[in-house]
Amino acid sequence: MAPFASQYIQIKMLSKIINHWRKGDLKQVVNTYLSNITVRHKIEAWRKLKAKGEAVVIGAGNGISLKLYPDSILSEPIFTGRFEPSEIDFVKSYLKKGDTFLDIGANIGLFTVIAAGEVKNEGRVVSFEPVQKTFSRLRENVELNKFRNVELVNAGLSDSDGTLEMITSTDGHDAWNSFGRPTAGTHFKSESVSIKRLDSWLSESKLSVIHLVKMDVEGWEINVLRGGMQFFSSPEAPDLLVEFTEENCKNAGTSCGELYESLATAGYTMYTYDRYKKRLIPEPRRQKYTHLNIIATKNPKNIVARIKA
């Protein structure tokens, strides 16, 4: 390469660095670059482990362990650290010792075990997972960590009490199991599962205060809201971390716009989370949500205080 060309590239790179520094996102750019390098190595490592066909136990931070399963597509992004890093950072930053956390759509328990580690023995985690195979894996991960502050509920939440047919994947796409039509996978079976209204469940539980709720139910979020509207409409209702995915909602007969309006009607305002600057960003309603996890709150100042503590 000619000297002037090399100098031009160096000057251009320096200019980009200065530009990112001025915008305040240099740390984010550097972390993303380093993370991409790490991810490539981890993908190779996961594929070697997957070939053995055995479950793999990884660390999830703060001495927490998580068992991953080679027959589940979700295991790779969790293993490589690409699965919802901002959401994980938010939950870790938000929760404090003694808090109560609801994990609605817990799957194998990533957020459950992270939350249980944050709230300590003085706190409580309640996890809802309706599919029997996935629920068994959720229980394995709770038992792996010897948690005594976690309650597991083998049921889904909806707008009625009873049973409902869940469409479950048989080809590794268990994270996309849905009461609607799953958006990933090609081979499925139907499983009759228990469902509860959140308002009904709460009336029978001994929970007095709930701080944070994570809701990831593959397009069924609006039905969870309807079944817990008395709870969610209360001025003391908890903060929420809710998945907005247009295709999931459409396959369940609703839309992200309808979900947004239902939350607003219940008194919530919506935000996204910048994990690098530890701040909330107002989230006005969009025409369409490809995939986004939104923080819904009635007290944004409380969240700001928590994540900066």
Image: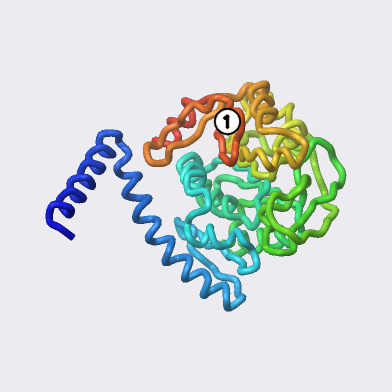
Q: Residue at x 59, y 57 (%)?
A: 147
Farthest left residue in view: 3
User: Mark 1: which secondary structure?
Assistant: strand
Residue 204 shows in this picture: no
Classify residue 11 as left or right of residue 306.
left
Farthest front residue in view: 2
Q: Residue at x 76, y 46 (%)?
A: 156
What quarter of the picture does the N terminus occupy? bottom left
Q: Position of residue 277 (x, y in %)?
A: 37, 37
Number of marks in picture: 1
Q: Residue at x 50, y 65 (%)?
A: 58
Residue 184 shows in this picture: yes
What quarter of the picture does the C terminus occupy? top left
Rendered view: 172 above or below 120 = below
Q: Identify residue for label 1.
A: 296
Q: Residue at x 56, y 39 (%)?
A: 292
Q: Position of residue 130 (x, y in %)?
A: 76, 52
Rendered view: 289 above or below 34 = above
Residue 220 picture quarter? top right
Classify residue 278 as left or right of residue 237.
left
Q: Nearer the viewer, residue 91 or 168?
A: 168
Q: Position of residue 159 (x, y in %)?
A: 80, 35
Rendered view: 240 above or below 268 = below
What colour scheme has been applied to the protein in the rendered image? rainbow
Rendered view: 89 above or below 51 = above
Amino acid on which the number 1 mark rests in the picture: Ala
Classify residue 274 as left or right of residue 12.
right
Could you classify mark 1 by the number of other residues whose Cα lies within 10 Å: few (under 14), some (14-19), or many (20 or more)? Answer: many
